[in-house]
Image (tube, rainbow, N blue to C red):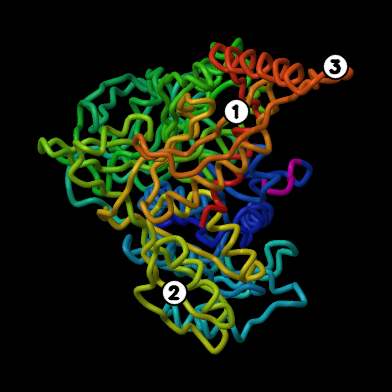
Amino acid sequence: MDFQHIRNFCIIAHIDHGKSTLADRLLEFTETVAKRDLQEQLLDGMDLERERGITIKSHPVRMSYKANNGEIYELNLIDTPGHVDFTYEVSRSLGACEGALLLIDATQGVQAQTVANVTLAFKHNLKVIPLINKIDLPAANLPLCYEQMEEILAIPREEALLVSGKTGEGVPALLEAIVERVPAPEKMNYEGTSALIFDSTYDAYRGVVTYVRMFSGEFKRGDKLRLFNNNLESEIKEVGFFGPEMQSSPNLSAGSVGYIIPNIKSPSDTKIGDTITDVKNPCAEPLPGFQDIRPMVFSGIYPIDTADYEQLKFSMAKLQLNDAAFFYQPETSAALGFGFRCGFLGLLHMEIIQERLRREYNMDIIATYPSVIYHVFMKSGEVLDIDNPVHLPDLADVEHIEEPIIQAKIMIPTEYIGDIMNLVMSKRGFCTQTTSVDADHVIITAEIPMHEILIDFHDKLKSITRGYGSMDYEPCGYRADKLLKLDIMVNGEIVDAFSSIVQVDMAYSRGRILCEKLKDVIPQQMFQIAIQAAIGGKVIARETVKALRKNVLAKCYGGDITRKRKLLEKQKEGKKRMKLIGKVNIPQEAFVAVLKSSGDSN
């Protein structure tokens, strides 16, 4: 199909504003999918996506649409993830498009993620078509949406279209607007074949399947391609498009969106954002915007039953095939045995991986407290990257430690501004800017250590604002602080799974809370158990699990006090010997309790 009849666009929105539902209506109205095959969230393939109502993987689809002018157009839709963890995938999807449908929930208005996605779209010079969705709901507030569009996003209200992804109202007008407003792909002014990888997946029978947007030239079966990132060359086994299932075609030409299946077996060889070119007709330079995906959050994952270690290793390898952003390597813990140190894009990504391991692979796992990458500056001049508190060197050899900082944009109703500022300060953050959106909403810009938002920040934000608050964040460098390693000792032995890096002013309160939690969950033994929080060699908090006590005086009738004292002294000696050789088995509930208490230490 010629350039003038191709339209490439994506749908961007805050999480749960109706992207997948609107995509269903577009497929229905263009008759891409037969009515008998229609189902809710058709483009969301995972059960987890359907249950949570979120998009985790981007799903392209090609639609054929006959416009009112009688011409037939090829509409390529790329459905993008909505969560902040997947910002890089969203940016690569935007790089494959010329237009974007900006979805705004008529009942909630503009949210923090909406602002972030619009900024990304403008950076990629996309034509943005604003849509106000869910207009069929009684709680729809159109005047608020129009006002926020103009005030926050600087988009005139006249450009907005009213739609309902549920009923299909306004969808025919939307399809016409896509044809009229979204520009056709531009012809590249240089020679050579180039295509952008905006996603990839793994097929057990065919190997790696790359999702691509063609910018120049064409690919067909039998051609030899080259990847710019690693100079890997491979023969193409198949090309095609998504309709929404994969359908092979003779070729994939400039301007279109589809898939290429090269003769590559390892998903790590194909990276999102990389450029594919033809060996016979190469382009001079790669397409802009590529960067390696780096994990932001780290956590240890261990099997509850140590016999499941090999099965967990196999499950993680399979999971990584369809998620190149997931990173893992073996590690050993004295408390938990053999497991893996895993890297994730963010908290939602971590949650999804753990849930998929439990559901899809039936693994009983436990995860340690999530951590971030710290920069440790040694007195010798060396700089270490530490993602596990266990590996933190002796503080006597450390010059200073820097922790990652995020810039958060928190959008809330005005009445909660004081409570949210208190929450930010309790997490060692500070507010840099407050912007009034309208009479009822405000955006707070704050800088917060990333470690502090890992467990419960989002939950507290939602509970304080009764569900009306939303947050978007991005990394903004590192900052030095007084940080140290907090160890937990049980019966004199350090339990490495409970170790954490904390700020010096919070060390005492966090140590005390952890000791109190462990006291409640560690079962009593025949001897007394000391639970201690320590920094270096200094104990800063202690709780004691009292011994189970046998009444040795029960059979002692009469006699003087010396007889009773002799029996008690004998018992005391026995307990002392038992304590020397006794071993405390820490139950699984203890690790769960520590994870739950970690968010309450502030």
In the image, 119 versus 221, the foreground residue is: 119
Q: Are marks 1 and 2 in contact (CB under 8 Å)?
A: no
Secondary structure state at the residue bearing disc 1 = strand
Give the residue at mark 2.
Answer: 444
Give the residue at mark 1.
Answer: 529
Residue 94 drawn at (x, y percent): 40, 54
Residue 449 drawn at (x, y percent): 38, 56
Residue 2 drawn at (x, y percent): 39, 50
Give the residue at mark 3.
Answer: 556
Residue 337 drawn at (x, y percent): 51, 17
Write down the region rendered in magenta. Answer: 37-41
Q: Residue at 69% of width from left, 16% of height from top?
A: 571
Q: How crowded is the residue under tag 3: few (<14 C-alpha within 10 Å), some, or many (20+)?
A: few
Q: How crowded is the residue under tag 1: few (<14 C-alpha within 10 Å), some, or many (20+)?
A: many
Q: Nearer the viewer, mark 1 or mark 2?
A: 1
Examine the image and state in which quarter residue 126 appears: bottom left
Q: Amino acid at mark 1?
A: Ile
Query: Which residue is farthest bottom?
Result: 439
Q: Is residue 410 above or below residue 372?
A: below
How far separated are the C-alphas under marks 3 and 1?
A: 28 Å
Q: Residue at 56% of width from left, 71% of height from top?
A: 131
- Give yes or no for residue 217 being in the magenta stretch: no
Q: How crowded is the residue under tag 2: few (<14 C-alpha within 10 Å), some, or many (20+)?
A: many
Mark 3 or 1 closer to N-term? 1
334 relative position to 123: left or right: right
Mark 3 or 2 closer to N-term? 2
